[in-house]
C-alpha cells in the first residue's frame, strides 16, 4: 500500500529554472511508483527514509555535468584505466530505505565485474565506484548520506561557487582529497578551472584542450 502522510509541497523554482518538489511521509512503494512514472526522463528522484524529492535540472547544470563526464573519459583513456559508464542509474536499496540518482556515475575498480550486465541490483552488485553531484540548485541534503550508506567509494561534488571537491569514503564519512584517488594526475582545482573557462563553449575544443593538458601531465 502506498502511503503519503502529507500532501505535495509547492514546488521551489530557482533562478536557473529548475524545480524541486518535496513529498514528506512517502514510503518505499510511493518512491518506486514515482520512479516508474518518470521513466527515462532526466528528472532526479531522491528518497531518504520517508522524504522524497523530485527535481528537474537546469541548462547550466547539464553543461557542467557534460564537461565533468568528458574529463573522466579523457583521464581514463589517457591512463588506460578500464571505465564503465552508469550515468544517472538509480542507486537504491530497500533495506536502507533510500535511493538516489547521480548526475553521472562510473565503474572503474569494479568495471570488469559489471561488464556485460544490463541491470543493476545493489543487493548483489557493487555500487558505482564514482558518483558525480553538480550543485547548481539546492537539492536534498541527504544525498551524500545515501552515497555513504550505499558504499560509493568516491563522490565528485561540483558547486558553482566552490568548484570541484573530491570526496573519498573513509569508514562512515567522506573526506575531501587534494586529488582523486582514481585520477591523482590532476587536481580538482585545475579541473575546476577548466570547467569555469569552458562551460557554455565548444565541447569538441574543450575535449582537445583537456586531453593536451593530461598528456602534458603524463609526460
Image (cartoon, rainbow, N blue to C red):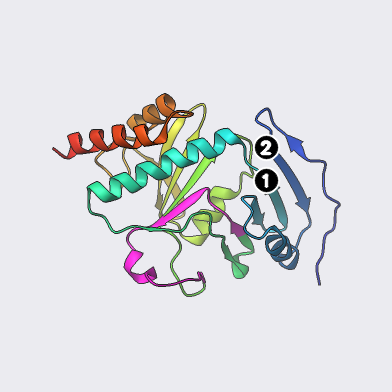
Identify which residue, 49 or 63, lies in the foreground: 63
* Residue 108 location (% of width, % of height): 34, 58
Q: Of marks 1 and 2, which one's residue comes earlier in the chain?
A: 2
Mark 2 neighbour density, 10 Å: few (under 14) some (14–19) many (20 or more): some
Q: State the image coordinates of residue 160 (x, y, percent, origin top left).
A: 52, 29
x and y, in percent, of residue 213 in the image? 24, 33
In the image, is 197 to the left or to the right of 52? Answer: left
Name the residue at 48% across, 50% down: 104
In the picture provided, is 163 more to the left or to the right than 92?
left
- Which one is nearer the viewer's eye here, 191 or 59? 59
- At x 35%, y 32%, the residue is 205
**Over which residues does the magenta segment extend?**
99-122
Q: Would residue 3 be counted in the magenta stretch?
A: no
For the N terminus, the quadrant is bottom right
Q: Which residue is mark 1?
A: 55
Total marks shown come to: 2
Q: Which residue is mark 2?
A: 18
The residue positioned 71% from the left and 42% from the top of the image is 20
Question: Taking 26 as reference, is 215 above or below it?
Answer: above
Image coords of residue 206 (percent x, y): 36, 33
Mark 1 touches mark 2? (CB < 8 Å): yes
Instruction: Check the image and report above or below for 93 versus 77.
Output: below
Which quarter of the picture shows residue 2?
bottom right
Mark 2: which secondary structure? loop
The Cα atoms of the two marked residues, 1 and 2, are separated by: 7 Å
Image vertical order of residue 69 relative to residue 5, above or below:
above
Amino acid at each position: 500500500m502506498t502511503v503519503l502522510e502529507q500532501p505535495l509541497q509547492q514546488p521551489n523554482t530557482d533562478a536557473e529554472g529548475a524545480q524541486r518538489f518535496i513529498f514528506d511521509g512517502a514510503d518505499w512503494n510511493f518512491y518506486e511508483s514515482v520512479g516508474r512514472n518518470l521513466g527515462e526522463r532526466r528528472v532526479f528522484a531522491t528518497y531518504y527514509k520517508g522524504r522524497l524529492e523530485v527535481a528537474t535540472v537546469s541548462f547550466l547544470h547539464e553543461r557542467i555535468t557534460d564537461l565533468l563526464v568528458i574529463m573522466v573519459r579523457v583521464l581514463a583513456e589517457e591512463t588506460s584505466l578500464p571505465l564503465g559508464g552508469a550515468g544517472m542509474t538509480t542507486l537504491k536499496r530497500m533495506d536502507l530505505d533510500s535511493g538516489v540518482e547521480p548526475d553521472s556515475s562510473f565503474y572503474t575498480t569494479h568495471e570488469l565485474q559489471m561488464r556485460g550486465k544490463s541491470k543493476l541490483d545493489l543487493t548483489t552488485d557493487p555500487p558505482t565506484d564514482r558518483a558525480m553531484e553538480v550543485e547548481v540548485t539546492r537539492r536534498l541534503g541527504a544525498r551524500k548520506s545515501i552515497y555513504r550508506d550505499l558504499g560509493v567509494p568516491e563522490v565528485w561534488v561540483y558547486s558553482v561557487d566552490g568548484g570541484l571537491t573530491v570526496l573519498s569514503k573513509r569508514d562512515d564519512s567522506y573526506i575531501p582529497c587534494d586529488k582523486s584517488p582514481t585520477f591523482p594526475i590532476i587536481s580538482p582545482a585545475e579541473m575546476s578551472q577548466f570547467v569555469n573557462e569552458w562551460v557554455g563553449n565548444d565541447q569538441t575544443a574543450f575535449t582537445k584542450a583537456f586531453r593536451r593538458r593530461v598528456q602534458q601531465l603524463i609526460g
